[in-house]
Image (cartoon, rainbow, N blue to C red):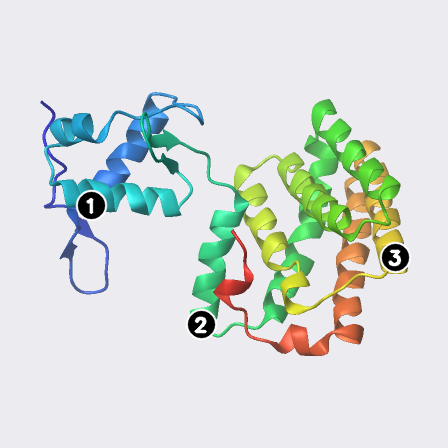
Amino acid sequence: MPAAPNTTGSARGRGTLRPRKTAALLAQRIVGEITDRGLEPGTPLPSEKEMLEEYAVARGTLRESLRFLEMQGVLTIRTGPGGGPVVNRPGSRHLASTIAMMLQLEQVAFRSIVEARVVLEPELARRAATNATPEQLERLRASCDRMRERIDDPDVFIEENDTFHGLVAEAAGNPVFSMVITSLTWICDGTPLGVEYSEAARVAVSKEHARILRAVEAGDPERAGAAMAVHIGDFAAYLEAKYPRVLDATLRWDQVDL
């Protein structure tokens, strides 16, 4: 039988070391096993009885670990006969939720997220112009087409706006960029704070996405970066002109919907 998680490990801290909770160590072990075994989303994990025997921990410890992983989006817990933990894949919303919680505790204004995007996204567009694969270009085209064809639908507009910026970040060639930007884009949505986009504003965004796409397709980093800088700058100016109170509002965790 495998040994129980080592509870003598210590968490990093300033000046002192504190023992890690058994539940946290067990959660880390379960994640390690998911990745080491290459378990895909939808794969069921062993039953509670089997996991208790395998990990040699108390029932409460196991359930605390599983609840934590469920909150992080690593697992879903199915109820009823044949239920139990099932492997899931955390999305950008889970990271966005964690970031939003930390920013609320630091009393960070919404404006700071916009400023971060102003700095980061033009560089990602430049990198995308160099690194984008044919498959990524096709997905960018599909996003632009869907936004243009459904421009009268605000929900589709928001969805494709998030998709486009996430795809540009993905095409930049570093998964960290994709995780961070898609999370910031989700936080920066603004609709939970009352931000609305008129049809004229939606059309303008659609045209800017198309300009960015053409530059990325052409493999022109400088033009792609410049087009993205204009796009994000216009977004910031739109908020400044129409929703200045939103920019100055403190971010709240409950405004990031999972």
Q: Residues within 10 Å of mark 1 (few under 14, many from 20)?
A: many
The N terminus is located in which quarter? top left
**Front tag of 1 and 2:** 1
Distance of label 1 from label 2 (alpha carbons): 27 Å
Per the image, the residue denoted by label 2 is: 106
Seen in the picture, residue 232 relative to 245 is either above or below; the reply is: above
Q: Is residue 118 left or right of residue 58?
A: right
Residue shown at the point (11%, 34%) measured from the top left: 4
Which mark, by number, is residue 23?
A: 1
Q: Quadrant of residue 75?
A: top left
Q: Residues within 10 Å of mark 3 (few under 14, many from 20)?
A: some
Q: Could you say where residue 67 lies in the image, as x and y percent from the top left?
A: 30, 45
| Three-letter code for the amino acid on which mark 2 is drawn | Glu
Residue shown at the point (82%, 32%) measured from the top left: 217
Distance of label 1 from label 3 (alpha carbons): 50 Å
Per the image, the residue denoted by label 3 is: 199
For mark 2, give the secondary structure: loop
User: Looking at the image, is mark 1 or mark 2 earlier in the sequence?
Assistant: 1
| Three-letter code for the amino acid on which mark 1 is drawn | Ala
